[in-house]
Amino acid sequence: MSVSAEPAAEPAVPVKPRGRVARTAVLVAVFICAACGLVYELALVALGSYLIGDTVGQASIVLSLMVFAMGVGALAAKPLQRWAAPAFAGIELLLALLGGVSVLGLYAAFAWLSLYMPALIATALVLGVLIGAEIPLLMVLLQRIRRQDAGSAVADLFAADYVGGLVGGLAFPFLLLPLFGQVQGALLVGMVNAAAGIGLVLTVFRRELSKRATLLLTGATVLVGGVLVGAYAFADDFEVTARQALYADPVVHSERTPYQDVVLTESVSLNGNSDTRLYLNGDLQFSSMDEYRYHEALVHPAMAGPRERVLVLGGGDGLALREVLRYPDVREATLVDLDPAVLELARTDPRVSTLNQDAFADPRVRAIAADAFSWLRDNRERYDVVLVDMPDADSTATAKLYSTEFYGLVRHAMSDNARVVVQAGSPFFAPKAFWCIESTMRSAGLNTVPYQIAMPSFGEWGFHLANVTSGSAPDSAVSIETADDRTTGGPSIAASGRTPLASPGAPPLRLPADAPPLRSLDAATLQAAATFSPDRTRIPGLEPSTLMHPTILEYAQGEWANY
């Protein structure tokens, strides 16, 4: 925030010193306004991370624009210092109105107009200008109560400002979001903002207001308060309507958790077939029409071998767990998913629990609500099979789950001769991201074999099966096929019976001899799944993704943006 270096103008109407009470009132107003301003900033960042998924990008855009605009606002406030009290009241009412409805307006722009980014930029700039104008005007008001040297005045003002920022920053994630949600939380903060601004001026500085200014401010206060209260009353209906506009099918369950936006839809076709779909932050997680194809491909190739102890990372819907539990010799299945709300939905919602066949009620299952990365760091147990069923790496929150460090932790959780399989997105729509995941897994000491399937709801989708077995490759695996192999009559899948593109020592891509009846996989289908067309084969030179250099994020965001 910027403070004007020019001497404050003398008030038009002399104001007698009001002592400590008046100064305290100004500093309390500074505290409240700072808290509200930071909440507006965080609300814009949080909304962008929910809707767009790029938390770092959204934070960078919002914070940089608002800081720049605050400087502009501080300069723009210079001519207003002569009428500091009414100007401050007007600015706070306008800031309360725009800041309060900012989340609601941006959500509407996203749901109906497809103008989210232009609206976000405009909102951040306007709010920044208004926030930046606060401090210079408050400095003038503080000096009108009692003159003091500039250094002391700035110290008092900034102390209240920074403490208010601290309170606002902590209140947003731990109080406002859990209790009120984003839309109603922003509206409530707008009401507090308006009350603080107008309350200060109409009490401590009421003598500086003409009758006309008093009437105008009173009318504006009633108008702003009415809009904010009315919007608060209809916020739930608005959210339901806006959310439904984002989804083609009727929304049957929705909730915004501390981690993500969870939406369940259900449609029924004319012939009576039902399609239940789960979305997290707007991204499709499964369709009941074809989810079996994904989960059979994810689970069963990894179950060919020892499988007494299975670890599922992600997969809170319980559908991968359902496939694991089809093997009676699985003694223990541990599932770690970040969001307890998703686990509760999978347990209790009949649409989902029917799909997962009440997997969480099986006594072999241990479900843990935790961050998989942090949980693996503390884990000391070893597993025969690890299934990594995470959302795509299209945000900073999920990119760490596709890093060398994460796969190193996964490797330490694997027992001798264990297998791990990772869902790796689409080798067609996002080939760089797909092959970057393989490169990252290899950098953690895992021997990989890629394969892919076709899904109507997702398109072409891929996986990487891997192990940590050292030594020469078994007969069912070969070293990486090169371009020379394809052009000079080298090894072929027909001639050698080997799996193309597999690392030396990679596990054989096969189904267990005692696999239960499957709807989408058999030995021939799985063998064909390991063959990639020339335009979708391995991309050389892709750097592994790490915590400090999340290259997977760049690939995923860049490639999916084209579709």
Image (tube, rainbow, N blue to C red):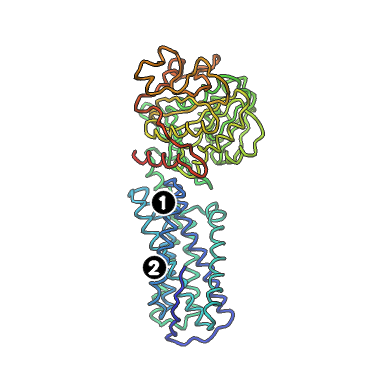
Residue 99, compared with residue 48, is above or below; it is below
Q: Circle 2: is it few (<14), some (14-19), or many (20+) Cα within 10 Å?
A: many
Between 176 and 52, the one lying in front of the other is 52
Q: Which residue is mark 1?
A: 238
Task: Say which residue appears at 46% left-offset and 73% top-offset.
Answer: 3
Residue 491: x and y in percent read 41, 16
Residue 26, compared with residue 468, is above or below; it is below
Between 313 and 477, the one lying in front of the other is 477
Residue 440: x and y in percent read 50, 34
Residue 518, compared with residue 420, is above or below; it is above
Q: Which mark is residue 407?
A: none
Mark 1 or mark 2, earlier in chain: 2
Task: Say which residue appears at 56% left-offset and 62% top-offset.
Answer: 166
User: Looking at the image, do the residues carrying marks 1 and 2 touch, with CB atoms under 8 Å apart?
Assistant: no
Identified by mark 1, the residue type is Phe
Asked where in the image residue 87 lies, by quadrant, the reply is bottom left
Residue 272 visible here: no
Q: Which residue is mark 2?
A: 72
Between 480 and 5, the one lying in front of the other is 480
Apparent side of residue 169 relative to residue 227 in the rendered image (left or right): right
Residue 158: x and y in percent read 53, 70
